[in-house]
Each structure stands twice: as structure tokens, then as C-alpha cells.
Image (tube, helix red, strand yellow):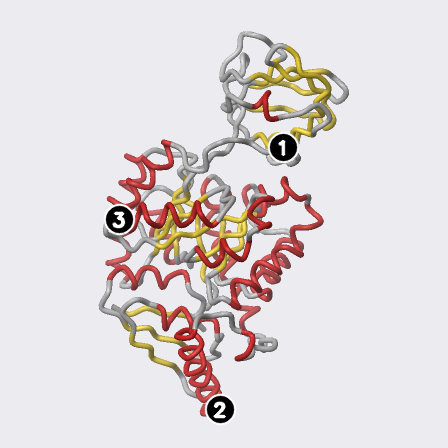
Amino acid sequence: MLRKTKIICTIGPAVDTREKLMDLARSGMNVARLNFSHGDHENFQRVIKDLRSIEEELGEPIGILGDIQGPKIRVGTLKNKTLELREGASVWMTNEETTSDDNVITSTYKDLCKDVSVGQMVLLDDGLLRLKITEKSGGRLKATVVHGGTLLEHKGISVPEATFSVHSITEKDYADILFCVKSKIDFIALSFVRSAQEVRHVKQFVQSRETAIKIISKVEKREALECLEEIIDASDGILVARGDLAVEVGNPRVPVLQKKIVRRCNLKAKPVIIATQMLMSMVENPQPTRAEASDVANAILDGADAIMLSNETAVGRYPLEAVRMMNQLALEIEAEPRGQAILYNEWELNSDGQMAIALLQSAVRLASILHARAIVVMTRSGYSSQLISKCRAACRVISVTSNFETYRQLSMHWGVEAIL
């Protein structure tokens, strides 16, 4: 049985050799994610070359997703590389990236002290460590440790109640996007998107260089939730980045938001990815927890097109086992009868899209009645395949294209098998 839900694997030190990449592909990887928050262009260039070679050898498309770092505010350099934060103790924060003081947290953001106010909570390392600002003095912030632990350099800093005046696309991001263009990467994921205008700007930047790279917006900021519909419309796809999203809105809201975002993407026929800590315990253990298995299953039941592994494959001890487990979980869920399909009058597409989806949805129903083994779609841009993917056909959907970019980009769409 062929799996329909697509699997995205983050490439890192645990799997960046050609042999390991081949093992990932054979274990079920459809898309390889390059995280530009880590790694360098030279290493990524080698990985891309290996992936293209593996793709040719296997005769199956492997999409490549470049995940741009974005304007994430991070801890700078600490005097002793780490800082032990004890609950109830006082600590200082500074705009500077380096310090010679033992009890000071540095920052990569020069306006941190200006934008953060007394009484606000500062979350470090995805919310594992928490501080409360008690004083602003001489360009520094004094804080009390609410939840302590060991702080490492370059960990993320988040202040959910503050509005930062940071640029949405940094100089590093532009350099990384240009690298993606030159390397003919298939997808670019934009981090910390706050508005549809940011997405349109990057699209124009990419399209002006005569490339059809698809732009995926990561929903992880409170501001993005306020203009979610516009961001979905402007994007080629959405990635639900549950880690930073949870820091922004709190863990209890994330499951509800996940279902809402997936539903909105499906009604607009945009691919949607669920990411972060899906099989996190497999970084250290060969088997996931029961809760993690249910999390993967529920993401598929919600209607996700793709599910993503991060640390599990990038730095984990059991990367291949994680991919195989995700593959097995997806196959089990897909073997069960699906719930209610999207009704014709529920789709939110333009007039051409509405007409196309009517024909494709009819084809899917007819295939079901006739017990057809497959539906064959001829496509140049991939749009017809994108639409029929959302109809969730029970049989195989074989998409035939003469376009190499489309061939690889169909690796993101649920249930679509691309043939060149």
C-alpha cells in the first residue's frame, strides 16, 4: 500500500552523508528540509547535489525545502558559554551580543531594552526558561527568574506581550533566499511571518529571478493569527510551527489552532504541514511515546498534507527509525475510512478554481463508484494535481508532467504520485 501523507525530514549532522540520505529516501522521506538557522551554504550545496543524485537513482521526486531563519531574537554570547538561572534569583538582560559579566543575558536584538516593558514575561529556549522584567535601568533590563534551568548561547528569546520593531527579512535571509534560487530549491519556508505583504514581497523577489519556487509561510506569531486568511491567500502553502506558536499563545491553544489552520488551508486548496516535536522522544529512544503516536495520527486525521520531523532526523540517535515509524503510523490511519469530504459549496476558490474542483471532485466520486485503481492527471503547473489532492481520492492519483519543477513540487501534495 502506498502512503498518501507526505513526510518531511530535516537534514542535519545525523543524516547528512549520501548513504544516510539514501536511507532516509528509502525509508519514506518525500521532502528534505534544510534549516538555514544552522549549517552553511557549502555544506547545503553538497547535500543538494547528493539529493538530486539520489532522486535520479531512485526514479522518484525528492522535494527540497529551504527553511529561512527569519528575524528570530536570540541569546548572544555568554561569558561562560552557559548561564545557570535559579528560580527567584535576579538576572540582567542587555542589548549587547557579548558581555564580560557573569550574571548577564546578552541579546542579538539591539532594541530589546526599548521594546520590552516592566511586568512582561520573557521566555527563553522555547519557553523552558521564564523571566519577569522588574526594572529598566541604564539600557539594561532586570528580571526575576520564574522558571529556572541552564541557558545556552543562541537560544531563542520571546516576549509574547511585546511588539518588536525588527525587520521581517534580514540580510542573512536575503543571502539564503538567493542561495535557494541559484541552487534550484523547490520550496522556501518563511519564518515568523507577520503579514501577507511580507509573503508577497518575497514572492516578487523570487519571481523577478525567473524561478517558480513555492513560498511556504510558517504560522508561529500572534500577529500571523490576526491576518491568517490573507497570509494563506498570499502563500503557496502553510507550515504550522507549533514550537514558537506555543510560546506565543500557550500550549492549550495550539491543538485548536492546528485544526483551524488545517481546515482553512484545505478549503482554500493550499498544502499544509504540521511540524515540531511530533516524535520528539525518538531523538533519544528507538520507540515513540503513545501520545506522540496519537499526535501524528491526529495531524493526519485533521487533514494535513505533510508531517515533519525536525531534531528526530537532524540530530537524533534514531533518524531512520523515526521516519519508518511515521510511515507506519500514516499507513495505519490511511487504511481507515475517511470522514466527511469537503462539500462543493464549501470550497473557497476563485471562479476557475471552483469549476476545476467541481470536475475533479466528480472524477474522484466516479472513481470510487467504479472501484477504479487510479486517476491520471496531466499537468504542467501542478494546479490540477493540487486541487485533486484536496479531494482525498481513495485510489491512486498519478500526476504526469513534463515540467521538472512541478515534478518535484508535487512531493508536498497528499496522495499525488508524480511521473516525469
Asked if 380 appears above or below 327 in the picture, the reply is: below
Give, as a three-letter code, the residue at label 1: Ala
Residue for point 54% across, 52% down: 240
Q: Is residue 271 left or right of residue 123?
A: left
> Of circles 2 and 3, which is in front?
3
Dot 1 falls on a residue whose secondary structure is: loop
Q: Nearer the viewer, residue 220 or 411?
A: 220
- Image quadrant where residue 30 sits: bottom left
**Label placed on residue 162:** 1
Instruction: Name the N-terminal-most of marks 1 and 3.
Output: 1
Dot 3 falls on a residue whose secondary structure is: loop
Asked if 374 appears above or below 238 in the picture, the reply is: below
Q: Nearer the viewer, residue 86 or 17?
A: 86
Residue for point 60% across, 51% down: 288
Q: Residue 367: percent from the left, percent from the top?
A: 44, 87
Crowdedness near tag 2: few (<14), some (14–19) or many (≥20) residues, C-alpha within 10 Å = few
Q: Please name the residue that numbered disc 3 is placed on.
A: 208
Q: Residue 24: percent from the left, percent from the top?
A: 39, 52
Q: Please name the residue that numbered disc 2 is placed on.
A: 369
Asked if 160 appears above or below 376 in the picture, the reply is: above
Residue for point 54% across, 12% down: 79
Instruction: Name the N-terminal-most of marks 1 and 2.
Output: 1
The residue furthest right is: 88
